Amino acid sequence: MLLGAPSVVWCEYATSAHAHGPLAEFFNSTSNVFFLLAGALGLRLSRAALKPAHPLLPSFLLADRTVVAVGCFSFLFHAFPSRLTQVGDELSMCFLALGYLLCAKGSCALSRPPNWAVILRSFQRVFALAFLVYAFVPVYAIFTTLFTVLVAVPALLNVRAWTEDSSLPIGTLLLSAVAIGAGKHLWNAERAAYTGRACPASEGELAFYYHPLWHLLAAASHYCTMCYLRACAARKMEGGGAFAVLPQVSDGNL
């Protein structure tokens, strides 16, 4: 089930597979450096912005370490496309969505007890369903739908947090939305080009770089999202409100 060809192919592979050496998709694979940079910078900022005893610091470290993993698995998928590397790529994205959710804990009324238990339990069930579907049922559209649900949950919590505290940096959250929206537009354009057999004919066309640009914009969106979540976590901790009842967890327990 995890062997064989991937269920999705990108235009770079169709246009110039292995044109730059052993990597099947040179630009699609190497552009994952943006995720590595976003994760490395996020780890540094989280440690600087949140005190070591902050109950959510492990969640922030998990999220930024996971985006580094996303970059690594995405590199492997584009460099050496197979069903196995595709599963690694997409499942790492599911774990990133989980990281976002854990970082949003306590940020608003919906993410505090008793609502938090319901949200987390529901999220875990969709997560498990996405895992099973993507690992054993090679239908890409099913996975993308489930993943959209996963990332929508923490996104809605972020918006709800701002409605409860308008002093939070909503501009940062809007930048995240603009970046991911623009990137998704390029992602959709490339998928349409591939399915319509209209992939760029050469590397000289701008459309050839839609997927690397998607990587850049998705990494930028992650960075902005984490900046917003850090501000939210710091603000709540300063107020001594929701986080005052959360257990203290050290980085060593991550």
Image: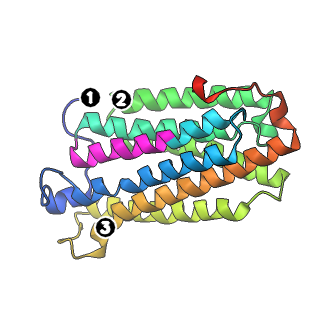
How many numbered badges does the structure rendering display? 3
Which disc is residue 2 wearing?
1
Say which of 87 and 96 sits in front: 96
The residues bearing labels 3 and 2 have C-alpha atoms spaced at a distance of 28 Å
Q: Locate residue 153 relative to residue 238 in the image: left or right.
A: left
First-in-chain label (1 vs 3): 1
Q: How crowded is mark 2: few (under 14 residues within 10 Å), some or many (20 or more)?
A: many
Where is residue 200? Give x, y as percent.
Answer: 23, 70
Q: In this view, does 196 lie above or below 227?
A: below
State the SS at label 2. helix
First-in-chain label (3 vs 2): 2
Which disc is residue 209 wearing?
3
Q: Dots 2 and 1: beta carbons under 8 Å?
A: yes
Q: What stretch is highlighted in magenta?
A: 65-81
Which disc is residue 175 wearing?
none
State the SS at label 1. loop
State whether residue 139 appears in this view.
no
The residues bearing labels 2 and 1 have C-alpha atoms spaced at a distance of 7 Å
State whether residue 130 appears in this view.
yes
For image coordinates 68% across by 35% down, the residue present is: 52
Q: In this view, does 1 lie above or below 217?
A: above
For image coordinates 55% across by 40% down, the residue present is: 63
Say which of 79 and 34 sits in front: 34
